[in-house]
Amino acid sequence: MTRPIDAALNELADEFELLGDWEERYRYVIELGRTLAPLAEAERSEANKVRGCASQVWLVTEPQTDGSIVFRGDSDAHIVSGLIAIVLRLYSGRPAADIATFDAKAALDRLGLSEALSSQRSNGLKAMVNRIQTDAVAALN
C-alpha cells in the first residue's frame, strides 16, 4: 500500500515532469509559495524560526490527537516560500512515524531540487526538513 506521503511525492514528481525546464519549474515553485496561508505575527517568533536558512523561515508544528502533525510555514523570499509549500505538501497532516522515516534526500533528488538549487538554498531546505523530522521524532516520544 502506498503511504500518503509517497503519493504526494509521486504527484509532485509528475507535476515537475510536465513542466520541463527549470525556468518553468521555478515559476511553479513561486506559485506554490503564494498558496501558503500567512502566519500570524506572533507565529513569526524565534521559537518557530528555522536555523540554517539564509532567508527568514518560520515553521509552526501542530501535533494532532490522531498522531499526525500539521505544519504551517512562511518565508520572506518567494522561492523559499515555494520550497516550504513543497515540504508541507509532503509532510503536513501525515503520521509522525511516516514523517520521521521518510527519505527526504531521495525525494528531493527525485524532484531534481538537489541539483537545481544553489548550495545556500539546498542547505536551507535540508534545515527545514531536519526541523520537521526532529519535531516528528519528538512527537513520537
Image: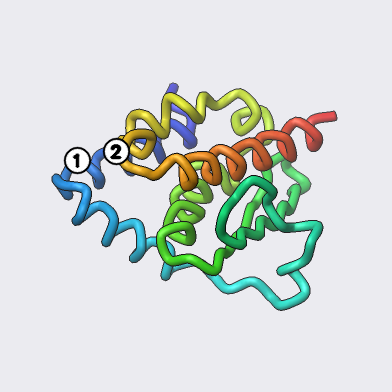
Picture layout, residue 112 above or below residue 18 = above
Q: Nearer the viewer, residue 62 or 120?
A: 120
Callout 2: helix, strand or loop?
helix
Q: Residue 113, position in %: x, y?
A: 36, 39
Q: Nearer the viewer, residue 49 or 95?
A: 49
Q: Quadrant of the C terminus?
A: top right
Marks 1 and 2: CB-CB under 8 Å? Answer: yes
Q: Residue 99, position in %: x, y?
A: 61, 33
The color scheme shown is rainbow
Task: Check disc 2 and give the amino acid type.
Answer: Ala
Residue that appears at 37% across and 44% down: 117
Q: In this rendering, would 141 be left or right of 104? A: right
Could you classify mark 2 by the number of other residues whose Cα lies within 10 Å: few (under 14), some (14-19), or many (20 or more)? some
**Marks 1 and 2, Cα distance to the nearest angstrom?**
6 Å
Q: In this rendering, would 68 be left or right of 87? A: right
- The mark found on residue 13 in the picture is 2
- The mark found on residue 17 in the picture is 1
Residue located farthest toward the right when viewing the structure as drawn: 141
Q: Residue 42, position in %: x, y?
A: 77, 74
Residue that appears at 75% across and 31% down: 137
Callout 1: helix, strand or loop?
helix
Q: Residue 33 occupies which quadrant of the picture?
A: bottom left
Residue that appears at 38% across and 34% down: 114
Q: Nearer the viewer, residue 62 or 49?
A: 49
Picture layout, residue 133 above or below residue 44 = above
Task: Check disc 1 and give the amino acid type.
Answer: Glu
Q: Residue 129, position in %: x, y?
A: 59, 39
Residue that appears at 44% across and 22% down: 1
